[in-house]
Amino acid sequence: MTSATGAAVGRRIGIGLMNGLWKPRVLGAWRVPAAGPVILAVNHSHNIDGPMLMGTAPRPVHFLIKKEAFIGPLDPFLRGIGQLKVDRSGADRTAVTGALDVLAAGGVLGIFPEGTRGEGDFAALRSGLAYFAVRSGAPVVPVAVLGSTERKGRLVPGLPPLRSRVDVVFGDAFAAGDGSGRRTRTALDEATARIQRRLSAHLADAKRFTGR
């Protein structure tokens, strides 16, 4: 099974699982380019953010996922559905190459630019997203996943209450670089700041629109 085929299978699994356990409401999916490389930059406040996006995005998504998730039977399963293991303790060349290969093949790369689950407010971004965007030239689409943040009704910490509504809001695609193609540290820092402004603005707009 190719990585692209695996991601398509993962999308079908995500659709069934997420619609079975929660009530996704997808807004602005048409903003995701129908073809060609694209990076989906997703806020990360729930454990279901990755699977939720896999099941609601209009195209199959290859996510960069922390290596700690690849344990036991989950390892071959995640690999089988086209997901990419990344070691966050240092520069993971295998993960970088895999992510760039996805984009070079015209695929969709999913990234949690905050690096780990937290407040989901894009307050602290790592430079990885900027590197992939500038290096590949792929447009970035901001995505806000907004579920209940209340603890009441949660069976498992970090998950929205079962059968509750989860809003997935896609924003307008934008170019992270300045058009020069530069990949210097200064250029990446500027791109990271540019991305953070766009992602934070999209999250604020999504919250206002959905009433979250």
Image (spheres, grey):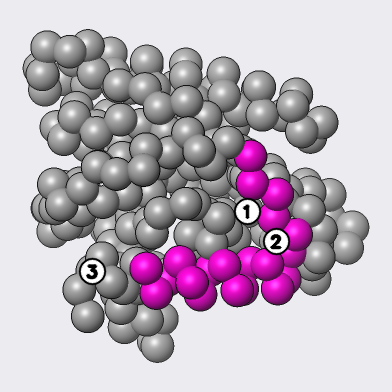
128 or 3, which lies in front?
3
103 or 151, which lies in front?
103
Q: Is residue 140 above or below residue 23?
A: above
Q: Residues within 10 Å of mark 1 (few under 14, many from 20)?
A: many
Residue drawn at x 43%, y 38% is 32
On screen, residue 166 versus residue 161, left or right, reads: left
On screen, residue 28 versus residue 178, left or right, reads: right
Residues at marks 1 and 3 touching, judged by CB atoms closer than 8 Å:
no
On screen, residue 212 versus residue 69, left or right, reads: right
Q: Residues within 10 Å of mark 2 (few under 14, many from 20)?
A: some
Which disc number belongs to residue 3? 3
Give the CA distance from mark 2 to mark 1.
6 Å
Which disc number belongs to residue 159? 2
Q: Is residue 63 above or below residue 203?
A: below
Give the residues drawn in magenta, as a range.
8-27
Majority SS type along the magenta span: helix
Location of residue 142 in the rendering, given as x and y in whole percent from the top left corner: 47, 32
What secondary structure is found at the residue carrying circle 2? loop
Residue type at the position of mark 2: Leu
Residue drawn at x 70%, y 73% is 20
Which disc number belongs to residue 46? 1
Residue type at the position of mark 3: Ser
Q: Based on the displayed image, in which of its 4 quarters is residue 164 positioned?
A: bottom right
Residues at marks 2 and 1 touching, judged by CB atoms closer than 8 Å:
yes
From where the camera sits, is residue 70 visible? no
Residue type at the position of mark 1: His
